[in-house]
Amino acid sequence: MARPRTITDERLLNALGAVITSRGPGFTVADVAAEAGVSVGTVSQRFGSKHGLLVALSRAAVGQVRDQVRSAGNALEAILGVFGALDDASTAANNLGQLAIDLADPELRELHGEFFAAFEAELAPLARAVPGAPPHAARVLVSLANGAAIAWSVRPTGSLLDRLTEDITAVLKGWQGNG
């Protein structure tokens, strides 16, 4: 009989997220193992490689973004919830650096596409609730948030969440004024 797992995939993926946040794309499987307090063999046995870890993290992120947006009361709250963990310039830079590496890999790029499609799909009902919002409002808001996050990470003035609030509120008010 196989020994039950005492280290969950969730624990290992949380460790991966923490390592990407602190080290960026230069992280190693050993870094993830150390963060999780397990052996490199445990991580390698479960995920096979750094790529396997990134695939698993990307798959998990799709479900997480769905849950996060569904639990929000409005579009702005949903977007702030999704981007909240990036409200630090070095954290944002490290995560965006990893994203850039991921986009060069076809499998990871496809998984990121699934993430953004899920984000947009879950945001759509909240965006449609805004008077005057166009039919593609969710796509516009996701694009605005992504662009603002990138621009802010390059020139981090103030808080990312404040920047997102200001930019998204301006767009929402503009739609309401036309509604």
Image: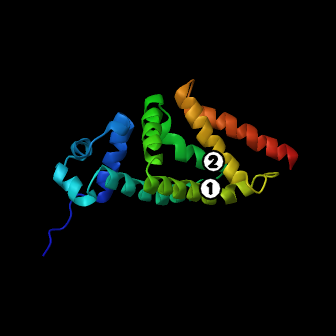
Of the residues shown, which amino acid type is indicated by label 1? Glu
For label 2, the crowd category at 10 Å Cα-Cα, with few meaning under 14, some 14 to 19 and many 20 or more, is: some
Instruction: Classify mark 2: helix, strand or loop.
Output: helix
Vertical placement of 121 versus 30: above or below?
Answer: below
Q: Which of the two labelled residues, at mark 1 and mark 2, occupies the earlier sequence position?
A: 1
Residue 149 placed where, x, y %? 57, 36
In the picture provided, is 165 more to the left or to the right than 177? left
Tell me the CA gap for discs 1 and 2. Answer: 6 Å
Toward which corner of the image does residue 126 lie, by quadrant? bottom right
The answer to whether residue 55 is seen in the rendering is yes
Disc 2 target residue = 142
Q: Nearer the viewer, residue 136 or 107?
A: 107
Of the residues shown, which amino acid type is indicated by label 2? Val
Vertical placement of 104 versus 71: above or below?
Answer: above
Residue at horizontal 64%, vertical 45%?
Answer: 143
In the picture provided, is 28 more to the left or to the right than 81? left
Extreme residue in the bottom direction: 1
Instruction: Classify mark 1: helix, strand or loop.
Output: helix
Residue at horizontal 44%, vertical 37%?
Answer: 97
Label disc, if present, on residue 99 of the rendered structure = none
Label disc, if present, on residue 120 of the rendered structure = 1
In the picture provided, is 147 more to the left or to the right than 90? right
Residue at horizontal 21%, vertical 64%?
Answer: 5
Toward which corner of the image does residue 168 lie, by quadrant? top right
Q: Nearer the viewer, residue 123 or 115?
A: 115
Verify CB contact (< 8 Å) between mark 1 and mark 2: yes
Residue at horizontal 62%, vertical 42%?
Answer: 145
